[in-house]
Image (tube, rainbow, N blue to C red):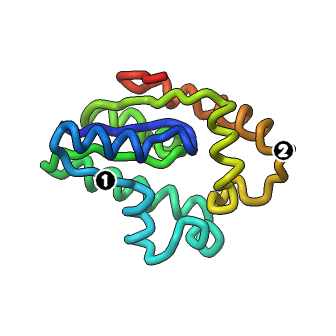
Amino acid sequence: MKYFIVGYMASGKTTYARNLALRKGLRFVDLDQAVEERAGCGIPELFAARGEACFRELERQLLRGMGESGDDFVMATGGGTPCFFDNMDYMNSRGETIFLDTPVDILVERLRRERFSRPLLASLADDELQAFVVRHRASRLPFYLKAKQKIG
């Protein structure tokens, strides 16, 4: 079985996916980490050097490659993964999808501490962060809600 964990930035996807993989005895996969390994640099550097479109295409290629493999796994996807191309429909066709619906106030608190490592947030001031998260998350919610399961 393949499990794809989706949700907004800082929703806890990696932690949840690691724990689920351990409980199920499956391999844990971090899609962002796989992108960094393939690109040979961190995601902020990839965004700066080649742009978001390059990042999203590489992300899609890796998602498809792993999804087509015969291996079972639990994957923590990136926050935007379900929102580009037909990635969410693809994940639904390949296994179980689980949406971690973390409250906005928790997301904002987590992101306030780590925003400089996230290309979409690095330029925001503290007073801009909450409004951005509310607006940006709302634009992604229709994709997340396509998941087969919702937690939160």
- Left or right: residue 57 versus residue 134 is left
Residue at disc 1, secondary structure: strand
- Where the N terminus falls, by quadrant? top left
Question: Which of the two residues, 52 or 16, is positioned nearer the viewer here?
Answer: 16
In the rendered image of this protein, does residue 120 appear above or below residue 100?
below
- Name which of mark 2 and mark 1 comes first in the sequence: 1
Which amino acid, mark 1?
Val
In the rendered image, the vertical position of residue 107 relative to residue 126, given as above or below: above
User: In the image, what residue occupies the spot 48% across and 40% down?
Assistant: 12
**Where is residue 31 shown, x and y percent of the image?**
39, 54
Give how far across and how far down residue 19 sits, in percent.
31, 41
- The residue sitting at 49% across, 75% down in the picture is 41
Dot 2 falls on a residue whose secondary structure is helix
Q: Which residue position holds label 1?
A: 29
Q: What's under tag 2, amino acid-wise?
A: Glu
Disc 1 residue crowd, few under 14, some 14–19, many 20+, Cα 10 Å = many
Q: Position of residue 125 (x, y in %)?
A: 84, 52
Would you call the spot at circle 2 few (<14 residues within 10 Å), some (14-19), or many (20 or more)? few
Disc 2 from disc 1: Cα separation: 32 Å
Label disc, if present, on residue 52 of the rendered structure: none
Q: Give the left or right position of residue 5, taking residue 65 as reference.
A: right
Task: Give whichever of 112, 62 is nearer the camera.
Answer: 112
Farthest residue toward the left?
Answer: 70
Residue 27 is left or right of residue 46, and the answer is left
Q: Residue at x 27, y 51 (%)?
A: 28
Give the labeled residue for mark 2.
Answer: 128
